[in-house]
Amino acid sequence: MKDTKTVTEFDFANDKWIKQHFSNEGAKALYAYLTNLEDEMRDEIEFDPIGIISEWEEYKDLEALNEDYNMDYDFETLCGDTQVIDVDKERIIIQKI
C-alpha cells in the first residue's frame, strides 16, 4: 500500500477511518488481501482510507450481511457475486455489492 511512504499493517489497522469501520482482525485481513493484490498486479495501491471504507464492509457473520442486503446468500453464492475475505470462522469482509 502506498501514499508517500509504505504503509505497514500497523499503520493500516490504526488509521482512524479504518479503526472506525473494521475490527482489528478485519483490518489485518483486509491489509493482507490488498498487499497480496499488489503483488499479483505488480503495482502499488494508493492508501486511501475513505475509498477503502466506501468499497469494503465487514460483517459479524453471513446472517448480518443477509439482513443488511435483504438476501439469503450462502457463502459460495456470495463469493460468486463479490470479493469476500474470510476474517475468521464467522466474520467476513465483502467488496460492497
Image (tube, grey):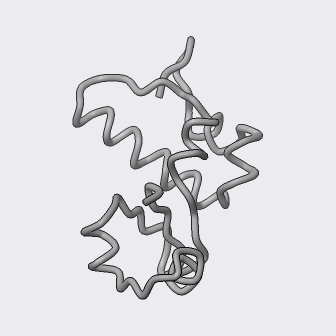
83 horizontally vs 59: left or right: left
Which residue is nearer to you in this view: 85 or 9? 85
Could you say which is closer to the camera, residue 56 or residue 86? 56
Rendered-image quadrant of the C terminus: bottom left
70 vs 37, left or right, is right
In the depicted structure, whether residue 18 falls above or below residue 62: above
The residue at 35%/85% (across/down) is: 74
| Residue 45 image position (x, y, % from top left) | 41, 27
Q: Is residue 37 above or below residue 7?
A: below
Residue sitting farthest toward the top: 4
Which residue shows up at 49% across the image and 45% down it? 31
Q: Is residue 94 left or right of residue 4?
A: left
Give residue 35's quadrant in the image: top left
Residue 5 image position (x, y, % from top left): 56, 15
Number of marks in the image? 0
- Residue 34: image quadrant is top left
The single residue placed furthest to the front in the displayed view is: 70
Q: Residue at x 30, y 66 (%)?
A: 81
Give how far across and how far down residue 24 sits, in percent.
66, 57
72 and 32: which is toward the camera = 72
In the displayed structure image, the side of residue 19 where residue 32 appears, left or right: left
Where residue 28 appears, as percent x and y from the top left, is 55, 52
In this rendering, the answer to whether 91 lies above or below 12 is: below
Q: Residue at x 73, y 49 (%)?
A: 19
User: Residue 54 is drawn in which quadrant?
Assistant: top right
